Image (cartoon, rainbow, N blue to C red):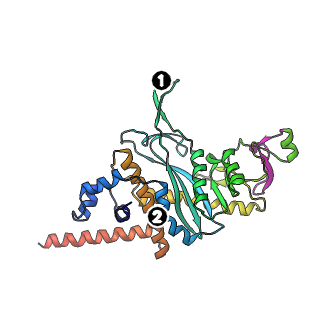
Amino acid sequence: MNRDLVDLYSDYLLSSFGATTATGLSDLLGGSLSHDQITRFLSQQRFDSKTLWQLVKPMVREIEDDAGVLIFDDTIEEKPYTDENELIAWHFDHSKNRTVKGINLLNCVYHAQGVTLPVAYELIGKPVVYRDAKTDRLKRKSTLSKNEHLRRMLAVCQRNQVAYRYVLADSWFSAKENLHFIRSDLGKHFVIALKSNRTMALSREAKRQGTFSRLDALNLPERQAVRGYLRGLDFPVLVMRQVFTNKDGSTGVLYLACSDLESDAEDIVAIYQKRWNVETFHKTLKSHAALAKSPTRTIRTQSNHCFLAIYAACRLTWLSVTHGLNHVALRTRLYLKAVRHAYDELQLLKAA
């Protein structure tokens, strides 16, 4: 790994406000680094989650805390005009309730002492091409599910000796295999959202008799933790119901499951609220780290650009910690400096 080029390219992503290209970076450097050198850097080296850990490990060790949390969530960066391949594929976007064409990125971020850093990621590729029996159209699918990727990433975090207590995720990652793996195999706890049709027994005896009821039929008290057994789990959990108000004034219901039986409802809510930090990280990736602003065409260059955008977002977070400014304030400062330089250059041209 050429660390100087990695840092240079990630700096370019953070300081750019338009498309990020090999030509653009070469021009920015006055030709000291050629277009071909940058293209080779993006196309010949292979960056992945293991590379990311090598870079972020020193930062993680500085903020590490046994009460830290690992947060999982995926995001889709739409690429409607880029040629389809196993990386640029059609994925279901649950926020839009439809399939979209783009890159599906599964992130694992570590949050401790108020700082959020990426520690693992997976680009969800779809290398298997098959013909759909219903539509008779060619489609793509992954060799591993996102839940399988999650368990692999957790195992890697365990090998890397990341200190944490809880795993946080939304209901898309609440599969019983994940919950068993977190609690039984890793010895960690989870606070994870559940869908309303998940079934639970309110006692060990009811579980033994197979008496399970849907969460939305149990009339659970609001913001009170109720002990019970989710179908498919051997250990008890706390489940609570939280009613919230949406921006449009409508109300919704959130069910949360927590494996830490010493927690109460307020603890569970406070812990799960930390999950929002992964959403903030995704916003940083898209708005401040140029995730979508590269016209790369090959799988290798596309995946390497994603890696460098993740690393750039991490570096922006660390600058935020160092200077006490949020991401928007830092980027605004860079933008104003760029505008000022452009203004001064314009005055010189006018005076010539």
Give the residue type that dot 1 points to: Asp
Residue 115, horizontal then vertical, whole percent: 55, 68
* Residue on which the image places disc 2: 55
Whether residue 256 can be seen here: no
Q: Give the extent of the magenta segment.
A: 210-230
* Label at residue 30: none
Frontmost residue, 288 versus 146: 146
Say left or right for 293 vs 327: left
Label 1 sits on a secondary structure element that is loop
* Residue type, mark 2 in image: Leu
> Is residue 151 something that shows in the picture?
yes
* Extreme-bottom residue of the structure: 323
Asked where in the image residue 8 lies, by quadrant, the reply is: bottom left
Location of the N terminus (image quadrant): bottom left
Q: Is residue 226 magenta?
A: yes
Q: Which residue is mark 1?
A: 136
Residue 160 as seen in the image, left or right of residue 138: right
- Residue 193 locus on image (x, y percent): 67, 51
Above or below, 95 relative to 281: above
Taking the view exactly as shown, the residue that stands out farthest to the right is 205
Q: Locate residue 306 relative to residue 236 in the image: left or right.
A: left
Q: Position of residue 176 (x, y in %)?
A: 69, 45
Classify 10 Å Cα crowding around label 1: few (below 14), some (14-19), many (20 and above). Answer: few
Q: Nearer the viewer, residue 161 or 81?
A: 161
Q: Was residue 179 drawn as part of the magenta stretch in this picture? A: no
In the image, farthest residue toward the left: 352
Q: Position of residue 53 (x, y in %)?
A: 50, 61
Mark closer to the chain start, 2 or 1: 2
Q: Could you tell me how far apart the alpha carbons at marks 2 and 1 are, in whole angstroms? A: 45 Å
